[in-house]
Each structure stands twice: as C-alpha cells, then as structure tokens.
Image (spheres, rainbow, N blue to C red):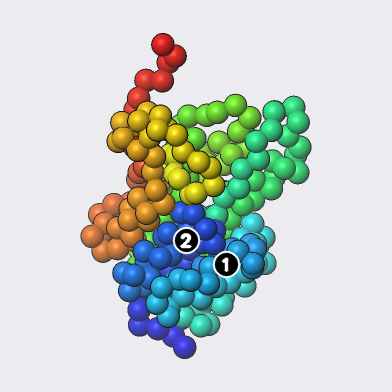
Amino acid sequence: MPTHHPVALVTGGARGIGHAVAVRLLRDGWHVVVADRDAADLPTNLPGGHARNVTADIGEETEVTRLVQGIADREGRLDALVCNAGVMIRKPLGALTLGEWNAVLATNLTSTFLLARAAEGLLRTARGAIVTIASSRAHQSEPNTESYSATKGGLLALTHALAISLGPDVRANCVSPGWIDTGTDPLRPEDHTQHPAGRVGRPEDVASLVAWLVGPESGFVTGAEFLTDGGMTRKMIYAD
C-alpha cells in the first residue's frame, strides 16, 4: 500500500555501511527498501516495522527495472536513492581478467546509472535526493586496485553529472569514505592514531552524513563530494 512517509532505497544494505544507513533512516522515520544480491545476507534485525528486503543484482538492467517498479507499486514513491553496493577485486594488473574488470564496473558504477535512470521519474516527483558511496580511493590508490579505484573515480564524476542533469528536482551528492571499521579485521592502536581524527571510522559516521544529505536541511547542497576519512587524504604520508 502506498505510504505517506518518505521512502529510501539502500543498495548493498546487508552489512557494513549500507546496513548502518538503513538503520539510521529507519530510526529517523523513513520507510526503507534494502536491496542486496545475496538473499541469505539480507538483515532480519532492522529496527521498526517499515523495512522491506529485496534480493536484486543491481548490475543487471532487468533486475533494476524490477526493483524500482516494485517500489512504485508497493510504496508508491521514492524520496532517496542511496547507491552503496560495491565490490573489490585485488589482483596484479597482469592477472586481472576482463571479466573481473567488467564485474566490478557493473556493481560499482553501472548500477548507479541504471538505478538513477529507472528511478528518475519517482525521484523528480518527490523532489528527492541521490547519495552515492564512492571511496577515498577515487583520489589515492593502493597497489592492485585498478578496477576498484577506476569505478570509484567514475562514480564521483557520475554523481556531479547527475546533479546537473536532474536539478533542480533531484539533488545528487557523493560520500567518499576512507577506512571504515566494519568488523571484518582486528584493529591495532596505530590504525587509529595515524588518523588526524584519532580513530578509524565507523559505519555510523557515514550513515549520519547520508541521513543529512537526503534530508531537508541539505537542500542547497548538490553535486558535492564529502570525504569522510578522518583527515587521511589531507595528511602527508611520505615514509620517514
């Protein structure tokens, strides 16, 4: 049944940053559609009664069409699109296959194009917002991350293009996280102290920024990038 509450679609919402964004928006009174490729990973412990899980591979055009049409049919509106889904393949350049390159491109970059295109009408009607989740690797790189860095840099450019093409009806902004602790690896004291902010980031740091960007208080903000990395990209990192 169509709702009068604002509705957000969060991709890659099963864990980490995407899960934190979904939780934050639910607590702020949003209805949230959480999309992820793996049904077994979709969250079952989201707060409130206004979350709906959808299994979808958003790198596939038909899946995106089905996902957005389902929102139009069930929720009747879409106020925010949070493009968070992402994958990384670390391989030496000579070992990276074209198939692997294209798979990363599909999930990290093409999916945002497909989602924005499919959801344009709903977002314009709602005078909504798009938030993409890129990475500080759009600016700095580690070895063997060519496909990931290229897609995150492309996502940053796609975001400001969307801001110009869809404005003033739809705002589009990009959040570029640095090191965010999603609980997959143990942290050392020096992991925290190397950051000018004094600690590694948390998913909730990103979620609070996303919540502001999709809300009314950021109504004059579009086409912008928000580096959320504890100051690391501003720090000289030459070896002593």
Question: Which element carries disc 2, helix, strand or loop?
Answer: helix
Q: Quadrant of the C terminus?
A: top left
Residue visible at 41% across and 55% down? 131
Q: Is residue 3 visible?
A: yes
Residue 182 location (% of width, % of height):
48, 49
The circle on residue 42 is 1
> Which residue corresponds to the image point at 61% horizontal and 52% vertical from the top-left?
107
Q: Is residue 31 above or below residue 202?
A: below
Q: Which mark is residue 135?
A: none
Residue 110 percent location from the top left of the image:
60, 51
Q: Nearer the viewer, residue 120 or 60?
A: 60
In this view, which residue lies farthest toward the top? Answer: 240
Residue under the image location 37 percent in, 66 percent down: 25
Res. 204 image quadrant? bottom left
Residue neighbourhood size for the residue with mark 1, other residues' Cα within 10 Å, grouped as few (<14), some (14–19), many (≥20): many
Residue 85 locus on image (x, y percent): 55, 54
Q: Earlier in the sequence, mark 2 or mark 1?
A: 2
Decide if residue 3 is on the left or right side of residue 73: left
Q: Is residue 105 visible?
A: no
Q: Nearer the viewer, residue 30 or 121?
A: 30
Name the kind of residue labelled 2 in the image: His
- Residue at coordinates 69% horizontally, 28% vertically from top-left? 92
State the count of labels.
2
The local secondary structure at tag 1 comes to: loop
Q: Position of residue 229 (x, y in %)?
A: 38, 38
Disc 2 and disc 1: Cα gap in Å? 9 Å
| Mark 2 surroundings: few (<14), some (14-19) or many (≥20) residues within 10 A | many
Three-letter amino acid code at disc 1?
Answer: Leu
Q: Residue 90 sits in which quadrant?
A: top right
- Horizontal placement of 35 versus 190: left or right? right
Disc ID at residue 19: 2
Q: Hey, which residue is sitting farthest bottom in the picture? A: 1
